[in-house]
Image (tube, coloured by chain):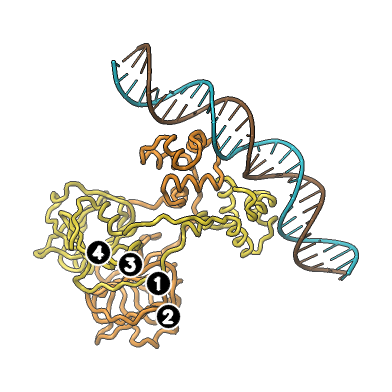
Chain colours: A orange, B yellow, C brown, D cyan
Amino acid sequence: MSDDFEDFTKLLSSARGSSFKRQSTADLGERVRAIRRSKNWTLEEAARRTGLAASTLSKIENDHMSPTFDAVQRLAEGLEIDITELFASSAGERPSGRRSVTRAGDGRGMETPVYAHKLLASELVQKRILPFVTRIKARSFDDFKELKGHKGEEFVYVLEGEVLFYTEHYEPERLGPGDSIYFDSGMHHGCISVSEEDAVVLWINTG
Amino acid sequence: MSDDFEDFTKLLSSARGSSFKRQSTADLGERVRAIRRSKNWTLEEAARRTGLAASTLSKIENDHMSPTFDAVQRLAEGLEIDITELFASSAGERPSGRRSVTRAGDGRGMETPVYAHKLLASELVQKRILPFVTRIKARSFDDFKELKGHKGEEFVYVLEGEVLFYTEHYEPERLGPGDSIYFDSGMHHGCISVSEEDAVVLWINTG
DNA sequence: GAAGAAAATTTCGTATAGGCAAAAAATTTT
DNA sequence: AAAATTTTTTGCCTATACGAAATTTTCTTC
């Protein structure tokens, strides 16, 4: 079974699997308390660092009030955390306990005009890492209608053959077996085979 | 140059590189207005969808007040955006335009008693993907003091030799060249070589 | 287990968030 | 361009956030 794609962004979103809107249970208080406790700070100490009154912090932790945006910001800054952590469980809460084995040669086929991807661990949905074993069909830069960029970061490790890797802002780079390249997907990028046989690479993508 | 670690969590945080706190310029109002305008909604429409009064929205957009946490949540939900977008400039903003090539055999050495890792693209800091070429030194399950879990997800692709991969909740799995395994890092996990030579794998980690 | 110290919670006063309705401003229609 | 309509802003009022200090609870130490 092999799906066809002309747009890499669509391929990725298909590979990633459907994402469901998450409901924020949002017991902010619990989270704040956990963070403060983990740093072994008293309310007083946290108050000193955040600039909020200890009483205010107590009320926040016990869900007796809903802090203002300002307060939330001072909270994050004072607790030395990224503000998004305060919404962590609403955002975080990742699956855990999954495992998936893919045997050599297996994987869900996904074809574009220039690449033949096999998505590994395809039975898992909502992965953070998208691993492909990819055969590079392209033989010339002109095989690409256009080089496109998308969100995320990418890592490519050459398994067999030789490739020429094109990225925006840089000279093309020639890579052989065991060589690898890491880049921000935002740059336009593409890859062609330059060895006798089509090159095969391990292509890792993250969102 | 090769660092020594006894704790994988520490190894990962070292590999990931230092993270700098970012300042939130946080003109929330401007951002909210931009989002609402982009959807061609009137204040009234946005009020209907968020459950907040139009006047309240007006005041938020004009920075005449600092909404409570509750209000921010209803705002995000009603505007159909991820709540972190409201802190976008404080949270989002990923680097873009980086590229790093690592030649076969190169990489920053990082040793544990059971693994010899080489971190690829080590010159890049704040990567989403941590790629290692790892030689599996462990030969028996007993070589591990303890199997530990940590945050994130992991993907391992066998390059050479044969390994036995242990994960919590599952039977050990035997993997040869070209085989791969994907799993949630929260599970305790570990890997030993079972072939004549030490096995070598490509080990991908994400936070 | 009582006395003292430290931490957390509650109380209360003031400042401000947030809803409603009316005024002002902007847009469209005739 | 004046009138009508839609959209946004402004007062006004009540509910609630937040700080200071008092009170209660929890943790020490004898």
Residue D12 percent across, percent down from the top left? 77, 41
Left of A157 or right of it: where is A9? right
Looking at the image, is A56 positioned above or below residue A113?
above
Mark closest to the chain's N terminus, 1 or 4: 1
Q: What is the secondary structure assignment of the residue under circle 1?
A: loop
Please tell me which residue lies in front, B97 or B163: B97
Q: Residues within 10 Å of mark 3 (few under 14, many from 20)?
A: many
**Can you tell which of label 4 and label 3 is closer to the viewer?**
4
Residue A50 percent across, percent down from the top left? 47, 42
Per the image, the residue denoted by label 1 is B97
Per the image, the residue denoted by label 2 is A147
Q: Residues within 10 Å of mark 1 (few under 14, many from 20)?
A: some
Tell me whether marks 2 and 3 sit on the same chain: yes
Per the image, the residue denoted by label 3 is A131
Identify the residue at image location x=57%, y=55%.
Answer: B28
Label 1 to label 4: alpha-carbon separation: 20 Å
Residue at the left extreme of this rendering: B196
Please tell me which residue lies in front, A44 or B178: A44
Mark closest to the chain's N terminus, 2 or 3: 3
Amino acid carrying label 2: it is: Leu
Identify the residue at image location x=30%, y=57%.
Answer: B183
